[in-house]
Image (cartoon, rainbow, N blue to C red):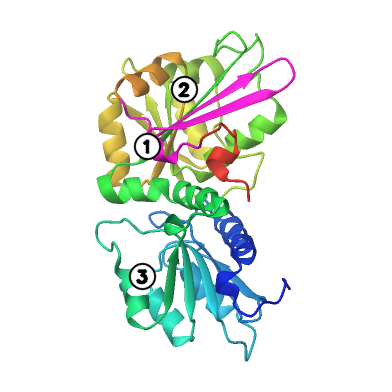
Amino acid sequence: MKVVPIENPVEDTALIEQAFRYALRAARLFDGSTAPNPPVGCVLLDQAGEILSIGAHQAAGQPHAERMALAELPAGSKPHTAVVTLEPCAHFGRTPPCVDGLIDAGVKSVWIGAQDLNPRVIGGGAAKLRDAGIEVHFLSKRHEDFAKALHLDCRRLIAPFLHFAKTQRPFVTLKVAVDANGSMIPPVGDKTFTRASSLKFAHKLRRRADAIVTGSGTVLADDPHFTVRHVDDVSDKVRPLVILDRRGRVPSAYLQEARARGFRPIIATDLKSALADLGQSGCMEVLVEAGPELAAACRALKLVNLDITIERLADNDRIRAVYADPSLNGEQCEGEADVFGNN
């Protein structure tokens, strides 16, 4: 893959922007498969401006994005610049520190999309790189328009991970669909009234989620499957399916069918306790798909980290995504891009 050759790729912002878009795209391919780690992408370039390799973290216990990119380097190539969506790690876990790999490979410059604010490792990666004489550039410190937009994309990418790392509670995404009048009840005989593009978006949310939470009313009214069908799912992923059912109304046959579809069904009576239990079991992100009552309860208890409404209009569907952290909201509503980026 060839881009415009330049003498110093570190200063070519068009090249850096392009590399970040490739890195984000690579990371998004594994959205939903990396818990309890974040999805991360990395691009390595040589001094002439050629993209040498692209890597992404694919699952916990597997090499991190930087190590994957290093492993994909062509024989004899010399990486000069690393572009990575998240600050490289400097600690030993299941895999060795990524900063050591970049240092050993002779990288001269590292561009970082988002700082790792995990309380256990904050700031360590960038500091170690600088101590080794490597230039470190954070998008958050740049003033170009491209840097602001990509920094926001990188932060959104890891928002569930950072929330989970700080609180040990899952990042809660609430998804509701309404018609033009604000009703969540689809026409008789239908389970949804959204269009195909919105269904694909909803299934991408399911793919990313580590667990699904719903209410007994939704189960009894719709007999929902909650499976990922409109996009490829993560292989061998078994999601808890938590059903809030205080009155014991959900039939055992539904639970058996949910197990046959690959879920681990759980009957719960308290929403907060259920979310706490999911966090203790390692669920990083939870998707709430439910009717008006449970949706209202989630909002009233301020449990929602990402509030998504899909509204069916006359000619199209409008997607509104609002983060509880205001710094993650853009200046304009961009629909699906506010969740999965423009890359």
Instruction: Name the residue furthest bottom.
Output: 76
User: Residue 152: where, in percent of width, then height?
Assistant: 48, 47
Alpha-carbon span between mark 1 and mark 3: 25 Å
Number of other residues with Cα within 10 Å of mark 2, as a class: few under 14, some 14 to 19, many 20 or more? many
Provide residue 170's location: percent of width, then percent of height. Answer: 34, 41
Going by the numbered disc 2, the residue's amino acid type is: Ala
Which residue does the image show at 54% across and 54% down from the upper left?
144
**Residue 290 numbered tag:** 2
Q: Which residues are magenta?
A: 302-330
Q: Going 32% across and 80% down the picture, which residue do you hit? A: 131
Q: How many other residues sit within 10 Å of disc 3, few (<14), some (14-19) or many (≥20)?
A: many
Residue 284 forms part of the magenta stretch: no
Relative side of 235 to 130, left or right: right
Determine the image quadrant of residue 95: bottom left
Circle 3: residue type: Ala
Question: Label 3, on which residue?
Answer: 126
Q: Determine if residue 326 is in view.
A: yes
Front-lying residue, 31 or 79:
79
Disc with the residue nearer the chain's start (1 vs 2): 2
Count neighbours of disc 1 (C-alpha within 10 A) and say few if under 14, some if 14 to 19, many if 20 or more.
few
Which residue shows up at 75% across the image and 19% down it? 315
Asked if 323 appears above or below 292 in the picture, the reply is: below
**Which residue is at the front of the view, 206 or 99?**
99
| Cα–Cα gap, marks 2 and 3 | 42 Å
Q: Nearer the viewer, mark 1 or mark 2?
A: 1
Give the residue at mark 1: 325
Does the magenta-highlighted stretch encompass residue 323?
A: yes
Residue 245 visible somewhere in the drawing? no
